[in-house]
Image (cartoon, helix red, strand yellow):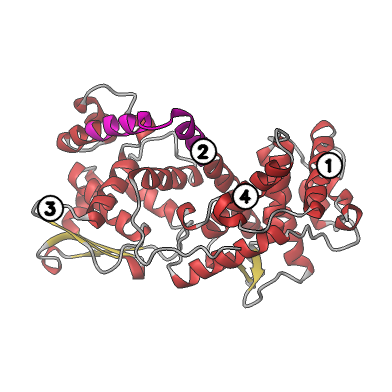
């Protein structure tokens, strides 16, 4: 398989930043809402990035700036004046805070800061500006308004920022019309699938952690449920594309659900501290619960007995593992990126199907496991009383 290396300095495109912010808003379940109180949004964001910290300092301690970001430490420092402005809903304070948040979440190098005077935007500052714009006035919501005055009023941003936002929205629409409309539409469709899958997986992992806080022995994949959700979403897409390369025109919701479940089993997002692979009975049950709960959410099924199936150990007596050799190298690549780059993964860090595939492809054994699992989920959808997990037996698919 070809080695896929990430550039030393990642430069994000406008579309990538838009996707990243949209994903964050989906994970927090506010994608269809305006970011009215950015401090409340920040507190919710700390559930995804626990290292995030806000430091409020006196105005004199930041004489040349309103705020300063420390991406490597996940800290944002703001002056007391900016903090008081945030409490009042001041438009400049909101933009300043969102801008610095962009520096941290995009993991910009060094110690970028926002001065009181307007300066020429370099690439890093431009990326932080686009992050703030997408956070405070998301494209899908802002484009429903016709004038800068309406946007400024609706999203609590300055009139100058609103005018620039209108220009950016026009540029986005123009960019969509350049090149092949079909390929552009497919890219947007794939992006939407990845975001939806990540949101479903993230909430499944978070719920499983919430149920086991008393154990104090668990950790998410690479210390981040967010990283796990991105890798699993990408794994789901790659596995589906690999399957479709062998079984053209066979895609359906049950196959996508099976890919998601296998991706979760492969990544094994909940682990014991210091242990690479979950081995205890509790950890196996938690990972199984994540996989089945994600499928339940994806297929929009009502399965009130799902938790009891897991925790009462009424699963198949054999250890439930759905191996995927095809995804094993992707997990290794994701681990290398998380360790060598930063503690945040982005979809753009992970390879496309054609880059990833190289000289290897999905095996027939894995295809049979996928098809068998998809059939089980189809039965599950028609009869929710079936303890479907009892039927998952990899040995039967070999």
Q: Earlier in the sequence, mark 2 or mark 3?
A: 3
For marks 2 and 3, give the CA distance. Answer: 33 Å
Residue 192, disc: 2
Residue 120, disc: 3
Could you tell me residue 138's position as x and y percent?
Answer: 35, 37
Q: Which residue is mark 4?
A: 238
Q: Is residue 66 above or below residue 15?
A: below
Magenta-colored stretch includes residue 180: yes
Classify residue 284 as left or right of residue 46: right
For marks 3 and 1, give the CA distance. Answer: 58 Å
Q: Is residue 142 above or below residue 349?
A: above
Q: Is residue 171 above or below residue 395?
A: above
Q: Which residue is mark 1?
A: 376
Could you tell me residue 116's position as x and y percent?
Answer: 10, 55
Describe the element under mark 1 as helix, strand or loop. helix
How many neighbours does mark 4 have within 10 angstroms: few (below 14), some (14-19), or many (20 or more)? many
Q: Residue at x 57, y 58 (%)?
A: 228
For marks 1 and 4, give the CA distance. Answer: 21 Å
Q: Earlier in the sequence, mark 3 or mark 4?
A: 3
Q: Earlier in the sequence, mark 3 or mark 1?
A: 3
Can you see residue 202?
Answer: no
Q: Earlier in the sequence, mark 4 or mark 2?
A: 2
Q: Are marks 2 and 1 in contact (CB under 8 Å)?
A: no
């Amino acid at each position: 398989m070809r080695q896929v290396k990430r550039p030393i300095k990642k430069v994000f495109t406008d579309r990538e930043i838009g996707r990243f912010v949209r994903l964050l808003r989906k994970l927090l379940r506010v994608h269809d809402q305006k970011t009215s109180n950015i401090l409340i949004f920040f507190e919710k964001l700390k559930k995804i990035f626990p290292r995030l910290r806000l430091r409020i300092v006196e105005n004199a301690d930041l004489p040349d700036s309103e705020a300063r970001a420390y991406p490597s430490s996940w800290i944002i420092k703001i002056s007391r004046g900016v903090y008081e402005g945030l409490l009042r809903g001041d438009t400049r304070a909101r933009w300043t805070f969102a801008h610095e948040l962009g520096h941290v979440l995009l993991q910009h190098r060094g110690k970028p800061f926002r001065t009181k005077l307007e300066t020429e935007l370099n690439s890093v500052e431009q990326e932080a500006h686009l992050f703030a714009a997408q956070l405070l006035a998301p494209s899908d919501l802002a484009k429903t308004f016709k004038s800068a005055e309406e946007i400024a009023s609706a999203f609590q941003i300055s009139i100058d920022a609103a005018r620039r936002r209108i220009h950016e929205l026009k540029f986005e629409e123009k960019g969509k019309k350049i090149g092949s409309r079909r390929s552009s539409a497919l890219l947007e469709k794939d992006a939407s699938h990845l975001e939806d899958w990540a949101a479903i997986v993230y909430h499944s992992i978070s719920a499983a952690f919430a149920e086991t806080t008393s154990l104090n022995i668990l950790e998410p994949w690479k210390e981040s449920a967010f990283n796990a959700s991105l890798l699993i979403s990408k794994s789901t897409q790659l596995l589906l594309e690999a399957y479709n390369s062998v079984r053209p025109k066979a895609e359906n919701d049950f196959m996508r659900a099976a890919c998601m479940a296998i991706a979760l089993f492969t990544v094994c997002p909940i682990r014991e501290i210091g242990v690479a692979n979950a081995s205890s009975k509790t950890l196996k049950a938690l990972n199984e619960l994540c996989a089945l709960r994600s499928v339940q959410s994806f297929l929009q099924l009502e399965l009130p007995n799902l938790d009891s199936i897991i925790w009462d150990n009424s699963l198949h007596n054999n250890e439930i593992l759905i191996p995927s050799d095809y995804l094993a190298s992707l997990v290794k690549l994701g681990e290398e990126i998380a360790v060598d780059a930063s503690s945040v993964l982005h979809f753009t860090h992970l390879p496309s199907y054609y880059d990833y595939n190289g000289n290897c492809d999905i095996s027939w054994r894995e295809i049979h496991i996928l098809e068998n699992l998809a059939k089980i989920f189809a039965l599950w959808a028609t009869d929710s009383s079936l303890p479907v997990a009892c039927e998952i037996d990899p040995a039967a698919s070999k």
